[in-house]
Each structure stands twice: as structure tokens, then as C-alpha cells.
Image (spheres, rainbow, N blue to C red):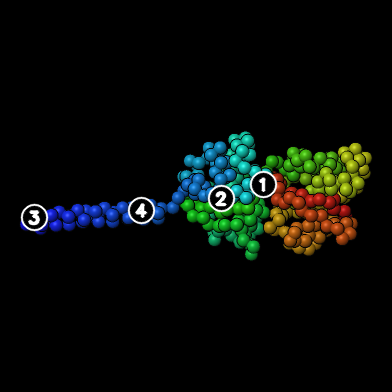
Amino acid sequence: MLISKSFSQLLRVAIVLAAVAVISTACKKDDEATPQTITDIVLANNDFTLLRAAVQRAGLADALRSGSLTVFAPNDAAFRASGFADVAAINAAPVATLTAILQYHVLGARTAASAIPTAENTQVTTLGNVPAFITKNAAGVSVNGVRVIQPDVDAANGVIHVIERVLMPPAGNIVQVAQGNPAFSLLVAAVLRASQGTTNVVQALSGAGPITVFAPTDAAFQAAGFANVAAINAADPAALTRILTYHVVQGRVFSTNLTAGNVPTLQGGSVTVALSPVSVRGNGNGGTASNVTSANIVATNGVIHVIDRVLLP
């Protein structure tokens, strides 16, 4: 009888333990099946250490846990390629700047890659109420010319599309963006000098657009014989107008929208675009093309591509 009683007690204990194990396993599976929020994914993924630092510094962690969102998420390589070398660089940026940048990466609804229309420059409104432009074509999905390198990372409150660069919100129209960039001091001087003639080039580059400008750097102007601002101011406004309008094409043409071949310009002539790598050549440049050294600088009225040689009609 003693043996039988002990056996019964052991059997009851075993049944209880088995039940506890089943319940624990079920709970664990339920936890594993529950998707993480966008914030949880950013905090846990070691490819997002710089994005994580930016989200924390901007105080947006809670905002990315709720709602239904789409986030175009730059990985660490994207932040470094965009000039944010490390966490210290993130923490050195003003909070308001980081907030504006991060909000420019977020849409207020879940949009999977399959739901994006196959089209160029579909306008969407970001969380900061600033428009961005999504293209979907045979090469994939891009936003403001920045490619999505990993689409559709599912989250409990939306979806993440990993991108190869940080999206920078526009700092004004094309003239204002150029004025804010020290590499364009001679370009700005040329625009102002040209506007003293019969064509108001400032107005043409500040209008509603959209337009695309291939913008030569100061070094490009110097290589073309314009050593400094004094040399620009000594030039004929009509000649400068002819050159400057030759750098402008109609439409918002990001690097992912460019096609090889001849493209008409505001000046009336055409430039020749080549791809892989992207370059553009003027008819007066002989066989020498201008390389696009930095693409897809967004302005409120278009886009700027930086080039290393002045285009000559």
C-alpha cells in the first residue's frame, strides 16, 4: 500500500509538471509569434546602431512603437555614407535637426513594397509634413533617388524598408540650397551676375519647377577659367545665362530616373547623359564628361546633382 500511495503521488506531480511545461511552451511560442514594434527592431538590430542613437536622441522611440507606419530606415553604412561617422556624430547634431531628418523617413500608414505603384516620383507626405518622392521600376524601389536595399521588414505597427542613404529634407529652393553650400560660392555668384542681364536666372531657379540642376562646384568653375567671384562678376551676364541654363533640365529627375542619351535643357540645346557611373557631357566639352559626384540633393522645387566640370553648350 505504501508503494502504491507513493507511486500515485509521483504520478500526480509528473502530471502537474507536464502541464506546466505545456503552458510554458505555448506561452513562449505565442511570444515568439508576436512581431516586434518598429522601435523594438531598431533597438535589437546591430545594423541600426546609428539609427538607434538618432531615435533615442530625438526622443522618437515611443512614437515609433504606435500607430501604423512605414519607415525608410538607413542602416549604419547609410549613416556613414551620409556623413554621420559614429554615435558621437549623431549626438553632436542638434535635436531639432535629427527630429526633422527622422520624421522625413516616416510615412503615416503601412505601405508594403508590393503596394507601391510602378511609377516615377509618386509623391507621399512624410511625418514632418514634407513631401518625398517614391519611384518603383525594374530596378526596384527608391525614395528621393535612394534605393531600398531590403524591403518589407515586418513589424507589429508597420513595415521597415532598409535604405542605402539618409534622406535629407529640403533646405529651401534650388537657389537657397546652393547658397547654403560653401562648395557652390561661384555658382551662386554666377547666378546673381547672370540675373543682371535680360534673363532673371535667380527667378528661373527659384520658381515652382520642378527642375533638375547639374551644379558645378567651385573647383569646376575654376577649371573652366573662372578663378574667383571677381572673375564671375567680370563676365558677360548673357554668356553666363547661356551656360547656366544649359545645366537645367525640366522635371524632378533623381539618379534612379535618369536614362542614357540626349536630354533637352532650359537653354535649348541638349546634354548627353551616361549611366554606370552617372555622368553628363555638354556639346562644347568635346569627349570629356562631367562626373556626378553627389546625387539627389533635394530642394523644394527640384533636385540637384553635383558635377565636377562646367557644361559648355
The kind of residue on which mark 2 rests is Asp
Foreground mark, 2 or 3, reads: 3
Q: Quadrant of residue 145?
A: bottom right
Q: How many marks?
A: 4
Which residue is label 2 attached to? 47
Badge 1 marks a residue whose secondary structure is: loop
Instruction: Give the residue displayed 67% in from the left and 44% down from the top.
Output: 83
Residue 28, numbered circle? 4
Residue 82, numbered circle? 1
> Considering only order in the chain, which callout, 3 or 2, is on the residue closer to the N terminus?
3
Q: Are marks 2 and 3 in contact (CB under 8 Å)?
A: no
Badge 4 marks a residue whose secondary structure is: helix
Badge 3 marks a residue whose secondary structure is: helix
> Considering only order in the chain, which callout, 4 or 1, is on the residue closer to the N terminus?
4
Instruction: Give the residue displayed 10% in from the left and 58% down from the top.
Output: 4
What is the x, y in percent for residue 79?
Answer: 63, 47
What is the x, y in percent for residue 113?
Answer: 55, 58
Q: Are marks 4 and 2 in contact (CB under 8 Å)?
A: no
**Which sits in the foreground, 140 or 236?**
140
What is the x, y in percent for residue 153?
Answer: 51, 55
Q: Is residue 176 left or right of residue 127?
A: right
Structural distance between the alpha carbons of marks 3 and 1: 78 Å
Packing grade of label 4 (10 A; few <14, some 14-19, many >=20) is few
The kind of residue on which mark 1 rests is Ser
Kindly tell me whether residue 167 is visible in this rendering: no
Structural distance between the alpha carbons of marks 1 and 4: 40 Å
